[in-house]
Structure formats: C-alpha cells, structure tokens
Image (tube, helix red, strand yellow):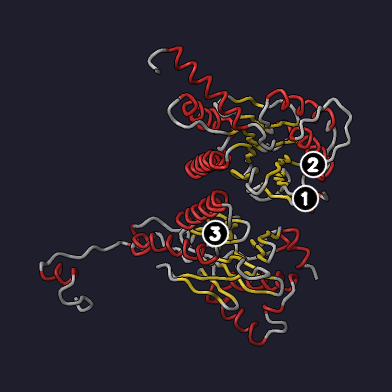
Amino acid sequence: MSHAIAGDFLSLLATRQVSALKVDAAAAPAQTQATTVFAFHFKDGVLMAGDRRATAGNVIVTDTIDKVIEIDATSVLAIAGVPATAFEMARVMQTSFEYYRRSQLQQLSLPAKVRALARLLRENLPLTMQGVGVVMPLFAGLDQSKHPAEPKIYFYDPLGAQFQAVGYAASGSGSNTIRSVISFQERYGKPPPSQMSLGEAVQFTSRVLMTASEFDAATGGVNPETKTFATIKILDANGVRTLSGDEQLKHLKP
Amino acid sequence: MTEEPYRWLEAVGNRREYVREQLKGGSPAFAVKLKDGILVLGVGSGQSKVFELFDRHALAALGHPADIEKIRQAAIDAAHMEAFTRAPEDVSLRRLISFGLSPQLKTNFEQIFSAPFLIEMLLIELGAEPESDVVVRLHYDGAFQISTTRVTVAASESDREKAAQDWLNEKLAGVEDRKEVAQRLLEAWWRLVENKEFSADVAADWKNALRDKIVEVGWLDRKANRQARYAPLSPAELGL
C-alpha cells in the first residue's frame, strides 16, 4: 500500500488484510462517451459545435446524436462524456433555468448558470469516481450585465471546477487533436478564429471536425455529399440559434 | 354560525358579493386566437397582468396582485413539475385547471373563514394548429369555461364581459393583423373601463386613456422553432 497515507482508511484496510473496493472496468457496461465538441469566439459571437457520433466501445451506436444542446434562449451546453448523465444534466438545467425565469420574471445571471452546472458535476462525483458517469461539458452563455450582451465560453473538469475560455475550448476524445489545430489557427491563421466571419467560422468548424475524425474513430466527420453535418449553434447578443444542415452547406460551397 | 346550513349559504353569498365588489374597476384582459399564434393583451398601472406560464402556456388576469401572484406561482410550479417528471408535451391546460387550479380555488372560496381569491383569469394554451388552441376563462370560485370563440375576455362584470366578447368576435372576424387586433382590443378595453356601450357608435379615445397606463402584450408564436413559444411584445413592436 505504498500510495496509502498512514492512518487513512485504505491503510487501515491493509493492516486488517481487507482488500479495498475495486472497480472491474471490464465488468462495467459499455459507455458511449467518445466525442468532439468545441466552442470558439468569432467575429459575431460564439460558435459551439459537435460531431454527431455516439459510440460504445468500438461500436458506432448512431451518427445522428445532438451533443450541442440549447438550454435556454441565452445559453448552450456541449456534452462530452456519458450521455445518460450528460443529457440528464441538460434537462435539469433547462427546467431550472426556465423555471427561474418564469417564476422570478428575470433571467438567471450567467455566473449562477455557470455554477449550476458546476454543482451538477460535483453531485455526480460518485459516478465519476466509479468511472461510469464522467461528464466534461462546455458551456456558453450570454453575459447580460454587459451592454451589448457578451457571449462567454466556460469549460469544466469532471469535479466541477469551472474555467472561462479566452478564445476557445474543446472536450471529448477528439479534443486533443483539434486543440492543436485551433491553437495553430489562433496564432498563425489568417484570419484567426476570433476574426472570422460566420461563413469562415462554419467552414473552419467543418474542417476541424473532419480532422478530428481522421484521428479519432469515435468522432463522426462532416460530409456534405452524404448530408452529414455537424451540430452548430451560434450565440450572439440576440441569443442562441441553430445552423441547419442547409445553412451549413451554403457556407461550405466554394 | 356555520353549523346552520343556511348560515353557510348566506356566508358564501356574502363572499361572492364581496369578491365582485372588490373586482369592480379591474382592468380587463383579452386573448385572441390567430393563425400564427395567440395574442394576449392586458392594460395595467405598473403591476403585470400578462404572464408566461410554460412553453406554450400563458396567463392574463385581473384582480389583487398578490392573488394573481399566488395563482401564477402555483400554475408555474405544477407545469414545470409535470414537464420534468414526464415531458413538456404532457403539460396541458385541461389537466392544470381541472386537477390543479380549479379545485384549489373552489376549496378556498368555500372556506369562509379564510380570505377569498380576488381574481378573474384567462389561461391560454397554444396548439400545433389554430383548431387545437385552448383558452379557458377561470373564475375566483374555481368555475371555468373553455372558450369556443376566437376572442375571449376576462372582465369584472359578466354582462359587460359578454358584450365585449361578442363585439370583438364580430369586429375581428377574419382579421389576422396583430396591430389591428391590438387596436380593437384596446378600444374594447376603453369601452369597458369607461362604461361605454358596445352597441353605440362612439369615437373611441383609448389613446388618451392609456397615457398613464402600461399596455402588456404576450405573443404565443406557433411558428417559433424553440421550445418556449411565448414572447412579450412592446407596443412599438406592434406598431401602436
């Protein structure tokens, strides 16, 4: 028990020759938790996108899942991790934010929304520690204390720590690949993502997802020929809107 | 005194009289079913009269602000609880009123030692098609009617309410323009609060009467592509 601290519960188990609880990962049900979601600031606001593939082990479950979810008119959630937990978190947020707005006749502030998600992640700690319920979401919301309202991006660790992203944030199994791509574009790109128009941002998003799908089997790509598009939501001073496949196609045409 | 049945009946009758007296002069509320959605309108003096309840549901009321608030909160609580435990599609006005609000209001009204609710309301549910829209007229004693007409009015006096409703249904037959609808509703509001006859051909002076008032308009949008279909509209947005 070299990693046990003298006097703690694990060392007590060791001295009494009782083996600590072990989770047999192989015995756990297959999880659908691989994905690529990301968000970045562009000229008009924030673009949040995700691929549409869900996998369980090496099985592709579906290529039509929406991982970028509109929580209310001014906030969006992108989920990476176990869908069962993540979708339930989205549902709790949708209901509680709308309930607050309708009953109190005012919007919940952005810091309160950001913390609400942090609290849900903290409450999910037991499942996270067991390795069967980890969720690492991205959140984008409109800061209405500013005039005009400013969209902001936040990312989280599985325990609920929240961080504001300056330029971009990514999560999921394909995020390592695209983080490098976006970082490169941010530093050397002409234009960098923050200066892109909507059309350029949509084109960039699709290319980033195609790149992620090259390196990560669990990320579905974008293929206009087969009408396979990303889920893209735009958050600007007017709120959230979804970019349909047809709108994306319009921007992808040369 | 309540051990004698006729005393109880008398007490209930007194309550009815008291509530009607208190509601006199209350500012009426209106709902109009249109092709693209439902327009809800109320005129207040600072206190809100038109509210969003849930994704496809709204409330417009006249009465004591504290009582409106209690009913509003109860309806919002019930709708969100239902949506969370089941699904947003399962929230229905029929169930909300029949099993929730109406029995509570009736019980409260008949508890003669507690204060009655001073309230008259319209509850509105947007359907997928105009034919499936539901507008319910709910009274302070829990009685309610599902409206079968295009325009529904909630006012403090039932005779005047019916006259306004008949007049509006005639004037607004086939009218889909929201500005025109709102103007007619404001004219009806002016006739109601100024005690003008609906049969008489009088020059409506509602613009002057609105000087120190706040016009509240709610729009339940049938074509909106998000879950929450309710949007408040300013008079400027309506072109008033």
Q: Is residue B113 above or below residue A103?
A: above
Label whose residue precedes the other's in the sequence (1 or 2):
2
Judging depth in this view, the residue of B180 and A242 nearest the camera is B180
Which of labels 3 and 1 is toward the front? Answer: 1
Amino acid at the residue labelled 1? Pro
Residue A90: x %, y % from top left: 51, 56
- The residue that label 1 is drawn on is B235
Give the Cα distance between marks 2 and 3.
Answer: 31 Å
Discs 3, 1: same chain: no
- The residue that label 3 is drawn on is A108
Q: Is residue B23 left or right of residue B111?
A: right
Which numbered marker is on residue B57? none
Amino acid at the residue labelled 3? Leu
Report how many numbered discs are placed on residues in the image: 3
CB atoms of marks 3 and 1 within 8 Å? no
- The residue that label 2 is drawn on is B182
Residue A172: x %, y % from top left: 51, 68
